[in-house]
Amino acid sequence: MSEQQAPVFSIEKVYVKDVSLEVPNAPKIFLEREAPEIEVQLHSEGSKIDEGMFQVLLTVTVTAKKDDKTFFLAETGQAGIFQIRNIPESDMEPILSIACPNILFPYARETISDLVTRAGFPPVLLAPVNFEGLYQQRLMAQQQQKPGEIPIQ
């Protein structure tokens, strides 16, 4: 009889998979004196890339607008390759939806702040995110759906 192997969770690589910055109304937008409203959107997805190896992609999109004028749109796809082995299948989704995005978010926050600053705007400092809360909200929304409906993310 073989002993059960110990669980493995390790970060193999953290990298920027995609980055984008748009300042569609430059240079006139720099003459605006009123601060824009900031909107933040998050999306994460995990996928198996090899036996025991997973990629998680956290996409953070920040849009700054005032009325109908867009100041900037900054987006980063912060990715990580994680080795995850000997974990029960029932625990995989929470790990990929909570633990991995928690690791990636500080890198994404830094990338967004750097992009916005390099574009000539004050840095955007994103508040911490409760990925466990977001995961629980998504689970509740899926449970409330009628059979046969397709969830929209």
Image (cartoon, rainbow, N blue to C red):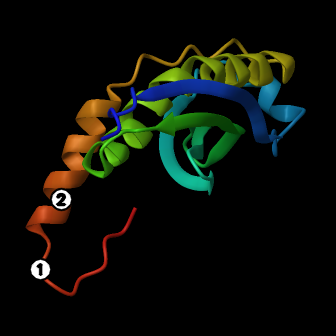
Q: Which residue is mark 1?
A: 146
Q: Residues within 10 Å of mark 1 (few under 14, many from 20)?
A: few
Instruction: Residue at 70%, 27% (x, y): give it.
Output: 14
Q: Residues within 10 Å of mark 2 (few under 14, many from 20)?
A: few
Can the viewer see residue 123?
yes
Secondary-structure class at tag 1: loop
Determine the CA span between mark 1 and mark 2: 10 Å
Q: Which of 112 and 108 lies nearest the eye of the viewer?
A: 108
Q: Which residue is mark 2?
A: 141
The location of residue 119, given as percent across then percent down, is 84, 24
User: From this viewpoint, which residue is outermost toward the right?
Assistant: 27
The location of residue 30, given as percent across then percent down, is 81, 24
- Is the residue 130 above or below the residue 59 in the image? above
Is the residue under label 2 in contact with that under label 1 (CB below 8 Å)? Answer: no
Instruction: Residue at 77%, 34% (x, y): give it.
Output: 16
Q: Which of 59 and 32 lies nearest the eye of the viewer?
A: 59
Secondary-structure class at tag 2: helix
N-terminal-most mark, 1 or 2: 2
Residue 77 falls in which quadrant of the image?
top right
Instruction: Residue at 45%, 24% (x, y): give it.
Output: 102
The location of residue 18, given as percent across then percent down, is 78, 44
Locate residue 112 relative to residue 100 in the image: left or right.
right
Locate residue 59 relative to residue 24 in the image: left or right.
left
Which quadrant of the figure contains the C terminus?
Answer: bottom left
Can the viewer see residue 64?
no
Which quadrant of the figure contains the N terminus?
Answer: top left
Residue type, numbered disc 2: Ala
- Is the residue 109 above or below the residue 49 in the image? above
Residue type, numbered disc 1: Lys
Determine which of the numbered discs, if any, sits on residue 111 in the image.
none
Q: Which of 53 and 60 lies nearest the eye of the viewer?
A: 53
Locate residue 140 relative to residue 97 in the image: left or right.
left
